[in-house]
């Protein structure tokens, strides 16, 4: 494989939607964040703010460089039904994310194959 075979793309990063969390789910995300991610200064809310900044910068980088961005975060809206913690998805979320990546990559792959004369 050579570098001309690679298709570059970026993805935003999804997190649980606070609006989709009930009180128990919200308490779990708050507790998990404090126990696993830094305690006093890192909260679920600060994590979401940092992640929103990361996602904005990812989109900006894609615009600046011409690299396509698959907006996983903008198309993933779930609570504990989709996420097991603040960043890891359950199987249903992983399957949905895989579908989003496939849907985002398919046109890029088709375009590449057409330009190489491998598709009509």
Image (cartoon, rainbow, N blue to C red):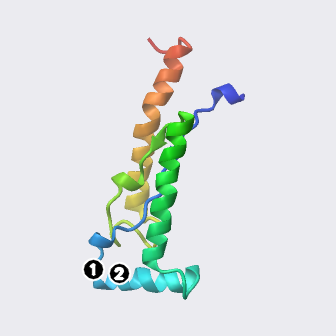
Residue 83 occupies quadrant: bottom left
Give the number of the disc on residue 89: none
Q: Residue 114, how many percent across, how many down?
A: 49, 16
Dot 2, crowdedness within 10 Å: few (<14), some or many (≥20)? some
Dot 1 falls on a residue whose secondary structure is loop
Q: Write the residue at 53% across / 33% down.
A: 66
Q: Write the residue at 48% across / 63% down.
A: 51
Report if residue 103 is visible in the image: yes
- Counting every numbered tag in the picture gives 2
The residue closer to the viewer here, 12 or 78, is 12
**Which residue is outermost to the right?**
2
Dot 2 falls on a residue whose secondary structure is helix
Residue 84 occupies quadrant: bottom left
Q: Write the residue at 52% across / 58% down.
A: 54
Dot 1, crowdedness within 10 Å: few (<14), some or many (≥20)? few
Residues tagged 2 and 1 counted as in contact (Cβ below 8 A) = yes
Q: Write the residue at 40% across / 46% down.
A: 99
**Left or right: 43 in relation to 6:** left
| Quadrant in which the C terminus appears | top left
Q: Residue 26, how many percent across, how many down?
A: 35, 81
On the image, numbered disc 1 is attached to which residue? 22
Cα separation between marks 2 and 1: 6 Å
Q: Residue 110, how many percent across, how many down?
A: 46, 24
Q: Residue 5, how many percent across, how many down?
A: 64, 27
Report if residue 87 is visible in the image: no
In the depicted structure, whether residue 91 falls above or below residue 30: above
On the image, numbered disc 2 is attached to which residue? 26
**Left or right: 2 in relation to 40:** right
């Amino acid at each position: 494989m050579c570098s001309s075979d690679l298709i570059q793309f970026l993805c935003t990063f999804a997190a649980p939607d606070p609006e989709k969390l009930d009180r128990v789910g919200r308490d779990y995300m708050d507790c998990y964040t404090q126990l696993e991610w830094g305690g006093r200064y890192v909260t679920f809310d600060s994590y979401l703010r940092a992640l929103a900044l990361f996602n904005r910068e990812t989109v900006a980088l894609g615009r600046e460089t011409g690299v396509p961005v698959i907006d996983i975060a903008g198309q993933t809206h779930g609570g504990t039904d989709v996420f097991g913690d603040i960043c890891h998805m359950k199987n249903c979320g992983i399957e949905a994310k895989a579908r989003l990546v496939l849907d985002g990559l398919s046109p890029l792959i088709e375009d590449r194959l057409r330009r190489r004369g491998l598709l009509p």
